[in-house]
Amino acid sequence: MIRLTAIFVSVGLTTGCQALVGWSSLPVGPTAEPAFEQGSRRPTLVQVPAAEPPPSEPPPTYRYLTAEQCRRRALEVAPLARLLTATAPRPSHPLLHRSAASTHLECLIRAYAADELRNRHIAETLSEYYRLAALEAQYDIWRQAEHILQEQIQIQQRAVEQGVSTPQEMQALQRQLLEVRAQLAQLAAARVALNAALVQRLDLSEADPPLWPDVTLHLDPRDLDAPAALATADLYRPDLNILRLLARADLRLIPTAQALLQSIHPLLGTQTQPSPLAFLLAELRKAPTGDEKRWQMHLAAVLEARQRQVAGEVRTAIALRQGRRILVQARQAQAEHWRQQRDELEKRQAAGQAVTRELLTARLELLRAQAAVIEAVADWYLADIQLRQALGLLVRE
């Protein structure tokens, strides 16, 4: 046994020596740093390939998703909401038994906190849904512009071959086509990003085929009654409801409520944007205990301050919604102007007048104005969602 071990050691040493011989020519230790060229500041050169980007093609199939399906799915899969509303296991030890009042208070606090999470998650999901709807509509409009320019380039090319037009005019059309295809490429990339975001928010298992927002975008011309909106927010806002709940709670349950608030607060802090209820819970955790009068005074002050903040949020959301509605109407008037220009030029062309260049400009400007209208309508939807979130209605609809 000892001989065998000695043989193995000898073989190992021999092999190791051969390996060292093979590496003997390599440098040992850190290598010297390369010498960099030095000099004054040089200009940055930009090289862009001259190749024209190919036309963008939309996906062949989609998964249709209505706005109500989107809202309902977002309500069901809101992060951490189920965790808050899950029934807590009852303690088995008799000394750990909680009173019915304590259990009821805890369930209500958890429910209001879950409403806050759901309200915010629905708002963010619907915002991405309507942005995707506007993007897809704009994509179709820019594809129309692409087809118009392609047809005009073919006509212009024949005119150049016949000697009745100059190559510079055709090059100008090709530059316009290049800009349109660049816009289409940006819209296609944004579509992929919004689809991925919606799939994640809605907890869908597959990313393909992409989602198609099955919705008709329309503007609601009605004005909102500010006092009625403030009354609605006062009724449904989770942060106001949880304050009123604590104000009516038995003083003996306050330590239990504060312990629960302390455990809930980190969950609300995981949101991408600051949650109003998160700030509220952080403030309530500082409230004094052991003195019923001081506790009630503190709650009354926090409730009054929060009501003023909610009123400001609602009024701001109403004003933003109204302002964006006016913007839509202005964009629509601009689109109507270019529609009239196009119709008039088409009549003049049918009568034999040479208005080809003017008609092309009117058609492209009309499409650009229609895309601007769609963007403004989508912005109005985002303002409307912001208002419904401020009212606390998204979890109640």
Image (tube, rainbow, N blue to C red):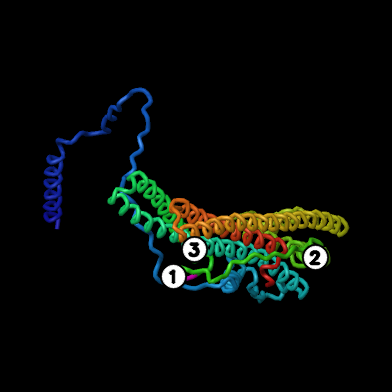
Which residue ends up furthest to the top in the rendered image? 39
Q: Which residue is mark 3?
A: 136
The image shows residue 197 at horizontal and vertical percentages of 50, 61
Q: CA distance from mark 3 to mark 1?
A: 20 Å
Q: Secondary structure at mark 3?
A: helix
Compared to residue 113, the image places residue 30 above or below, namely above
Residue type at the position of mark 3: Glu
Q: Is residue 79 above or below residue 359?
A: below
Mark 1 or 2, which is nearer the eye? 2
Question: Magenta segment, which residues?
Answer: 204-208
User: Badge 1: few (under 14), some or many (20 or more) residues near its Cα, within 10 Å?
Assistant: few
Tag 2, which secondary structure? helix
Provide the residue designation for mark 2. Answer: 228
Give the residue at x 53% y 60%. Answer: 343
The Cα–Cα distance between marks 3 and 2, rounded to whole angstroms, is 36 Å
Q: Nearer the viewer, mark 3 or mark 1?
A: 3
Q: Does the magenta stretch mainly form a helix, a strand or a loop?
A: loop
Give the amino acid type for the residue marked by disc 2 in the picture: Ala
Which residue position holds label 1? 206
* Residue displayed at 52% across by 62% down: 132
Could you tell me which residue is drawn at 22 percent across and 34 percent down? 28
Q: Residues within 10 Å of mark 2 (few under 14, many from 20)?
A: few
Residue 337 lies, in percent from the top left, at: 58, 55
Q: CA distance from mark 1 to mark 2?
A: 42 Å
